[in-house]
Image (cartoon, grey):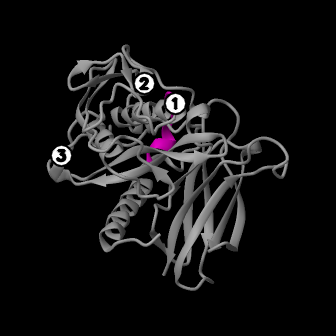
């Protein structure tokens, strides 16, 4: 993918924010389960995760603000955002981290949901499913329920658009549930949807009259997710790649491709497997012998059957730029 100077600058800022968080944050208990996968600061945690909604559950030397507290004036924030993507099992959710300017005055919850609804993913393999013009009206969290008020554009949100499958409609609602939970940072809280300030019986054809809990993690999220590097990141020498997965015996396979040709490859092991959660992984990648240019960094779960069983291993990729 060809990146504009603006896009490269933004991705560089996100990469810097992620790297800074990795240095500053200590490892600790993960509380309700899947948190490390939602916060780049916890990508090195040894505790099992489910791509948690809770950036604030990581132990550190100082308490972190909740997702609904506005950051200090002028302070930039990095928010977790889920998007839809293709997976061997069908449409699943993949996560990115977006850096937002402190001048916008957004808290984690409204910032994350605003990105999920109104921006396109940085990775071209993902997609934003919401009809053009859909925006966030408001989002609040009262300690029990996250309320998300949607503002429709030219398309009514109650019914599923003819161009959208039922599966994608259901996953689109899950996209906002998982993003809202991650932004609020208080665990798996139910989400009440409103449209233009009023309750709606359905959202994209999905029943939504009552607060909705998230669907099961392993049925909703991709079983392989790259946290770092970000899409389009510049790398040189050796770099550390991190992410979260759930694969057979915790094994994963990584490769660097020049077009369709594998030019580097290796293996890694996550911190666990099985259970209704994802687990963090980390690998070191040496690109010092590669010519400068664009490459694809690919990570997949190990498939001991060699493709003979199941739908195939979960995969995630990033474009990297070797300097």
Crowding at dot 1, Cα within 10 Å, few <14 / some 14-19 / many 20+, comes out as some
For mark 1, what is the residue? Answer: 166
Whichever of labels 3 and 1 marks the residue nearer the N terminus, that label is: 3
Crowding at dot 2, Cα within 10 Å, few <14 / some 14-19 / many 20+, comes out as some
Provide residue 59's location: percent of width, then percent of height: 43, 38
Task: Report whether residue 26 is seen.
Answer: no
For mark 2, what is the residue? Answer: 205
Whichever of labels 2 and 1 marks the residue nearer the N terminus, that label is: 1
Whichever of labels 2 and 3 marks the residue nearer the N terminus, that label is: 3
- Region rendered in magenta: 28-39
Given contact means CB atoms under 8 Å apart, are the residues at marks 3 and 1 in contact?
A: no
The one of 62 and 156 positioned closer to us in this rendering: 156
Q: How far apart are marks 2 and 3 (CA)?
A: 39 Å
Magenta segment includes 73: no
The one of 280 and 318 positioned closer to us in this rendering: 318
Q: Residue at the spot x=24%, y=38% of the render?
A: 153
For mark 3, what is the residue? Answer: 72
The one of 280 and 154 positioned closer to us in this rendering: 154
Q: Which mark is residue 175?
A: none
Please tell me whether the stretch drawn in magenta is mainly helix, strand or loop.
loop
Provide residue 256's location: percent of width, then percent of height: 63, 70
């Amino acid at each position: 993918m060809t990146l504009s100077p603006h896009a490269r600058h933004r991705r560089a800022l996100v990469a810097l924010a992620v790297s800074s968080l990795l240095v500053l944050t200590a490892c600790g208990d993960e509380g309700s389960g899947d948190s490390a996968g939602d916060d780049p600061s916890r990508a090195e945690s040894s505790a099992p995760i489910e791509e948690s909604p809770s950036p604030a559950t990581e132990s550190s030397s100082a308490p972190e603000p909740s997702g609904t507290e506005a950051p200090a004036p002028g302070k930039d924030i990095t928010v977790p955002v889920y998007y839809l993507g293709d997976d061997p099992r069908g449409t699943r959710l993949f996560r990115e981290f977006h850096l937002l300017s402190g001048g916008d005055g957004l808290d984690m919850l409204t910032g994350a949901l605003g990105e999920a609804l109104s921006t396109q993913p940085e990775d071209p393999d993902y997609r934003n499913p919401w009809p053009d013009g859909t925006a966030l009206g408001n989002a609040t969290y009262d300690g029990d329920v996250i309320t998300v008020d949607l503002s429709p554009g030219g398309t009514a949100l109650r019914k599923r658009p003819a161009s959208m499958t039922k599966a994608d409609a259901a996953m689109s609602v899950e996209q906002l549930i998982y993003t809202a939970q991650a932004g609020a940072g208080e665990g798996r809280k139910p989400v009440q949807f409103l449209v233009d300030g009023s309750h709606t019986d359905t959202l994209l054809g999905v029943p939504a009259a009552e607060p909705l809990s998230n669907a099961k993690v392993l049925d909703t999220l991709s079983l392989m997710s790259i946290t770092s590097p970000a899409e389009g990141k510049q790398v040189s020498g050796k770099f550390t790649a991190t992410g979260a997965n759930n694969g057979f015996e915790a094994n994963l396979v990584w490769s660097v491709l020049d077009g369709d040709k594998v030019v580097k490859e290796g293996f890694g092991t996550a911190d666990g497997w099985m259970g209704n959660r994802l687990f963090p992984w980390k690998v070191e990648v040496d690109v010092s012998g590669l010519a400068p240019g664009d490459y694809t960094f690919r990570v997949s779960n190990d498939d001991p059957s060699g493709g003979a069983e199941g739908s195939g291993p979960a995969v995630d990729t990033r474009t990297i730029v070797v300097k």
